[in-house]
Amino acid sequence: MPLDDRDLLELHRLMVIARVLDLAAAKLYGGHFPAEGEEAVVVGSFYGLDPEDVLAPHYRGPQIVFHMRGMPLTEIFLMLLGRATSYSRGRAPAFSGPVELGFVPWMGGDLGPSIGLATGAAFALRYRRTRRVTVHAVGDGTTNRGDFHEAVNLAGLWRLPIVYVIQNNHWSISMPYSRITLAKDLADRAAGYGIPGQVVDGNDALAVHAAVQAAVARAREGLGPSLIEAKTYRLRGHWAGDPTGYRDPAEVEAWRQRDPIARHEALLAERGLLDPAAARAVWTAQEAAVQAAVATAEAAPPAGEAELGLDQVFA
Amino acid sequence: MARRLTFQEALVEAIRQEMVRDGRVFLVGQDVGAMGGALQSTKGLLPAFGPERVWDAPISEAAMAGITAGAALFGTRPILDLSFGEFLPYIMPTIVNHAALVHWGTAGRARVPLLVRTKIGDGPYRGHPQCYEAWLPHVPGLKVVMPSSAYDAKGLMLAGLRDGNIVLFLEHMYLYHSVREEVPEEEYTVPIGTAKVVREGRDVTAVATAWMVHKALAAARELAREGIELEVVDLRTLAPLDRETVLASVAKTGRLVVAHDAWRIGGFGGEVAAVVAEEGFHLLKAPIVRVGAPHVPLPVSLTLRKAMLPDARDVAGAARKVLAR
C-alpha cells in the first residue's frame, strides 16, 4: 500500500521512539545492543504489515517493533532490566519478542538459528494455507553462517512466504564489512538461491519500506522469498558499554551526517508536513514517555528464586 | 488386534495413525519421500499423505531443525526425520540454544511440540553408527526416548507425537528390522518417562537401553545357568528419568550394573549410577559397575567394531563382578 502523509508522520514518530528508547536502554544497561542509526531499516521493514503476519526482527533494534505490535514501553524496559514482572520473568534475552504478538522467540545468544526458526514460522503460515508472511531481519555478519545458506535455499525451494532483510550495519562487533567477505553486495547471494535480491539505502525509511512491501506482496502471492540488503551503519558499539577502540571516529562521524531520522525530517519539512518546531515537539513527547516508562520499570521488583521456573521447563 | 511387526513397521504405523488423526502433523527429512526414508523409516507415507504432508528436504539439517521448530511454534506439529544420529550436531544450535528453552523462556506462553527421530547405534548396515544420546538429557527442556521393543516403539511414538515438548526419539538400528513381535493395531501410548522391568531377578539389577536391553537379557539367560538371577530394567526414556523404577529394583537386588553401547566415559550410565549413589547408597551391597564402549572413536571395520562394542558377555561379567564384592 502506498504511504500517505499520515504514514510519513507515523514513520517519523516511530523512528523517534526507537532512537529515544534505544538511548535510554543504553544508559540503563551496558549489555543493550544499540541500534542508533539503524532506525530506518527496522521501522521501514516492519511498518504496514498485516496484524497476523509473523515478525522476526534482528536482535539489534527489535524493541520498536515490539512497540509497533502493541507492547507498552514499560514492558520493553522491564525486559531490558530482567525484572520479575517482565514477559519472560527475567529468563530470556530482552530482544526475544512475545509469541502471542506474532514474534518468533529468540532464546539464545548465538546468531544463525533465528533464520531457520523464522523460516519455519513461514512454513507454518504456508502449511496452514494462510496468506500471511514472515519478515525476518538479520545482520550482515549472520549471513556468513551456514544457517543462512541452508534456510534461504530451502525457503526458495519450497517457495515459503518470507522476506529476509539484511540489516547491513557494516560492523560485526569489531570487524568491518571488508573483513568478513569479498562480496560487494550481500543481496547478490540471492542469485545463488534462485530468488530476487535487491540493495536499498538503509538510511531511507521510504526506500526500505517500498522494497519490503513489494517482496511481501510477492510472498503473499505464493511466489516465495526475497532477499533485501539495506545498507546502514551502526553508530554505536556492539554493546552499550563497547569502547569501540577498533574503528576510526571519522568514519562514524561521516555516517552521522547521514542520520536516517534527520533525513526523514528534511523530507517532511520539504513536503510541508512537519516544521522544525513540530518535529521538536515529537522528540519532547517521546522523551517524556520513555522517561516515565523507565521510572516505572526501575521501580519493579527484581527477578528472584520465584521466577526461576523449575516447573516451566516442560509444557 | 495384534500382528507381528518389526520395530520399523511399528514406528511407521504410529506415525501413519497420528497423521490420519491430526492434520497438523507433517514430516520433514532427507529421502523421506519417494525413497521411503533411510532404512524405510517413512515407508509408504508419501503415497498415503502426499507432498504437502511429507517433505523431502535437501542436505540441510540445520535448516530442517529451524523449519520444524519454527513451524511448531505457530500451530503445527512437525516430525523431523533426521536420518542418522551422526547428524545430531547439525541441529544442536537450534534445538539446544533456542527451541528447548521456549516454554520456560516465555513463562509458559509458547511451546514447541516437535518430534525429532533419528537412528543410532550399530546395525547390520554399518553406516552412521554413532550413539550421541548422552548429550541430550543434559539439556533442560528436552525429552529423550530410546525404546528397545516394537511395542514400546509404537506406544512411545504416539505419546511423543502428542507431547507438547521437543521429544528426541532415538531408534536403534540393530533393532530396526531384526525381531518381530506382537503389536496391537489400535492406537495406544506408552508414557514417556517410565522405565520397565523386562525380566525379574533377585540378585543383580541391570539397567540398560535399546539394543543393550537385549544383550542384558542374553546375559541374564547365561547367568541363570549359574544360578544368578539378573533383573533387567529397560530405561525406555532417558529424560525425564524414571528414578523410582530404578531405585525400586536396586532396593530389591542391592547390586547395580548400568549398560549401554555408547562410550562409558560421560555416558548416560553415569547419570543413572549417580542417582542411585545419591538416593540409594544405603540400598547398595556393592559398588556400581558401568558397561559401555571404551574411549576410542567408533571404527569402520566390522571386526574392530565387534572388539569395541560391549556385548552380553560384558554385562554378565559385570554382574559377576558386583556379586563378588
Image: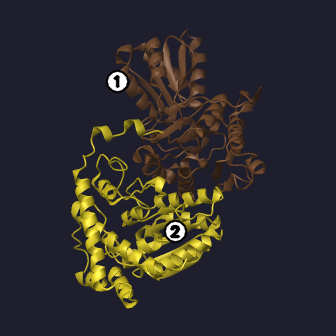
Chain colours: A yellow, B brown
Report the front residue among A286 and A216.
A286
Check chain identity for marks 1 and 2: say if they share one: no
In the rendered image, the vertical position of residue A76 relative to residue A277, given as above or below: above
The image position of residue A283, as x and y in percent, is 28, 74
The nearer-to-camera label among 1 and 2 is 2
Q: What residue is rendered at 33% in x and 55% in y? A: A75
Residue named by callout 1? B278
Residue A115 visible in the displayed image: yes
Report the front residue among B126 and A185.
A185
Q: What residue is rendered at 25% in x and 46% in y? A: A302
| Tally of numbered discs | 2
In the rendered image, the vertical position of residue A91 relative to residue B261, given as above or below: below
The image position of residue B228, as x and y in percent, is 53, 11
CB within 8 Å, label 1 to label 2:
no
Kindly report the distance in space between the C-alpha atoms of the residues bearing marks 1 and 2: 56 Å
Report the front residue among B180 and A71.
A71
Residue named by callout 2? A49
Chain under numbered label 1: B
Question: Taking B39 as reference, is B199 left or right?
Answer: left
Identity, as a three-letter code, of the amino acid under mark 2: Leu
Question: Taking A95 as reference, is A128 left or right?
Answer: right
Quadrant including the C terminus of chain B = top left
Report the front residue among B168 and A20.
A20
